[in-house]
Image (cartoon, rainbow, N blue to C red):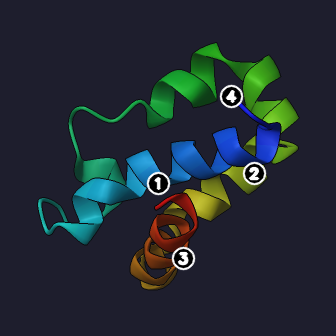
Amino acid sequence: MASDEYMRMLILYIHLNPVKHGFVSKREKWQWTSFNEFLHNQPDLLNRLFGNAETYISQHHAPQREFKEYQILESELT
């Protein structure tokens, strides 16, 4: 991985992908998400990449921002 910022963007991209494609309306409804794995079992990585759990959650949780943020991430990664 080139940088922590790139890793953070990949995590957000992957977690928001099912919303973009219309499989679910909210990220937390996707049954195969690794969101909770990071939140509960990877606190050191989560803190390094996002600063704290609240930031991690807020960057995933706002449904009105999800699609727009996904589009930005997609354009930066492709």
Q: Which badge, 4 or 1, comes first in the chain's sequence?
A: 4
Q: Amino acid at mark 4?
A: Met
Disc nearest the viewer among 3 and 4:
4
Q: Amino acid at mark 3?
A: Ile
Disc 3 to disc 4, how far (Cα)? 19 Å
Q: Amino acid at mark 1?
A: Tyr
- Circle 4 residues within 10 Å: few <14, some 14–19, many ≥20: few
Disc nearest the viewer among 2 and 3:
3
Q: Which badge, 3 or 4, comes first in the chain's sequence?
A: 4
Q: Which residue is mark 4?
A: 1
Disc nearest the viewer among 2 and 1:
1
Which of the 4 image quarters holds residue 74?
bottom left
Q: Which residue is mark 3?
A: 72
Q: Position of residue 65 (x, y in %)?
A: 51, 81
Nearest the viewer among 14 and 51 is: 14
Q: Position of residue 23 (x, y in %)?
A: 11, 59
Q: Which badge, 2 or 3, comes first in the chain's sequence?
A: 2
Q: Which residue is mark 1?
A: 13
- Circle 2 residues within 10 Å: few <14, some 14–19, many ≥20: few
Q: Position of residue 37 (x, y in %)?
A: 50, 22
Q: Which badge, 4 or 2, comes first in the chain's sequence?
A: 4
Q: Position of residue 24 (x, y in %)?
A: 17, 61
Q: Which mark is residue 54?
A: 2
Outermost residue on the left side: it is 23
Q: Which badge, 3 or 1, comes first in the chain's sequence?
A: 1
Q: Is residue 54 above or below residue 46?
A: below
Disc nearest the viewer among 4 and 1:
4
Residue depicted at x 66% and y 17%? 42
| Label 3–label 4 contact, CB within 8 A | no
Disc 2 to disc 1, how far (Cα)? 18 Å
